[in-house]
């Protein structure tokens, strides 16, 4: 019964967690066709998107001044990373995504893509389940010269 009172907050609908400093809702760990299990370690599976691109809407890309193929800096409350940009109308304005399974160190010493966990915080998690809010990380995206 005590939990029922706390669950009433869900009736109010989703909370807008973005703000002027971090206006983008970043989905950190999107499932993509080629990120199942560990196949992302096999470069042959990642010919289409070898770096795990940052997907962003055309509207946001125009505002920021970035295009497909450009580098952008993603900044959250806990970290920052560089990512290759993919502008796509599959993203709504105000939302962006990076795939899961990237940001791993390769045998040759390079790193492919962004590690979603480096942009998320254990302190920013679901009150009941304790899982980090990977699907709505307040973020800022900036063009890199």
Image (tube, rainbow, N blue to C red):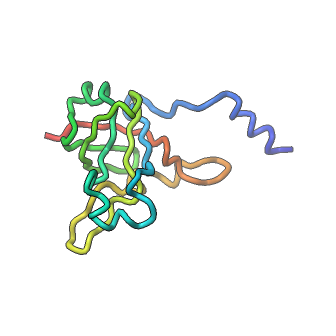
Residue name at image x 39 percent, y 51 percent: 99
Q: Quadrant of residue 92?
A: top left
Residue farthest to the bottom, as pictured: 107
Residue name at image x 40 percent, y 52 percent: 33
Q: Is residue 86 left or right of residue 97?
A: left
Q: Quadrant of residue 37?
A: bottom left
Q: Is residue 32 left or right of residue 1?
A: left
Across and down, in percent, residue 58 comes to: 30, 28
- 24 versus 32 height, above or below: above
Across and down, in percent, residue 95 comes to: 41, 34
- 13 versus 28 height, above or below: above
Of 88 and 104, nearer the camera is: 88
- 145 versus 117 height, above or below: above
Residue name at image x 57 percent, y 32 percent: 15
Across and down, in percent, residue 27 comes to: 44, 43
Q: Quadrant of the N terminus?
A: top right
Q: Quadrant of the C terminus?
A: top left
Of 73 and 28, nearer the camera is: 28
Residue name at image x 20 percent, y 29 percent: 65
Of 68 and 135, nearer the camera is: 68
């Amino acid at each position: 019964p005590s939990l029922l009172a706390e669950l009433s907050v869900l009736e109010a609908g989703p909370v807008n967690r973005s703000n002027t400093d971090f206006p983008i809702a970043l989905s950190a760990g999107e499932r993509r066709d080629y990120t199942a299990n560990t196949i992302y370690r096999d470069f042959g599976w990642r010919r289409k998107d070898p770096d795990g691109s940052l997907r962003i809407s055309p509207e946001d890309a125009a505002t920021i001044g970035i295009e497909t193929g450009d580098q952008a800096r993603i900044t959250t409350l806990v970290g920052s990373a560089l990512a290759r940009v993919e502008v796509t109308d599959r993203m709504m304005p105000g939302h962006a995504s990076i795939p899961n399974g990237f940001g791993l160190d390769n045998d040759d010493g390079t790193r492919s893509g962004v590690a979603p966990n480096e942009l998320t915080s254990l302190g920013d998690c679901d009150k009941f389940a304790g899982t980090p809010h990977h699907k709505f990380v307040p973020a800022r995206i900036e063009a890199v010269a």
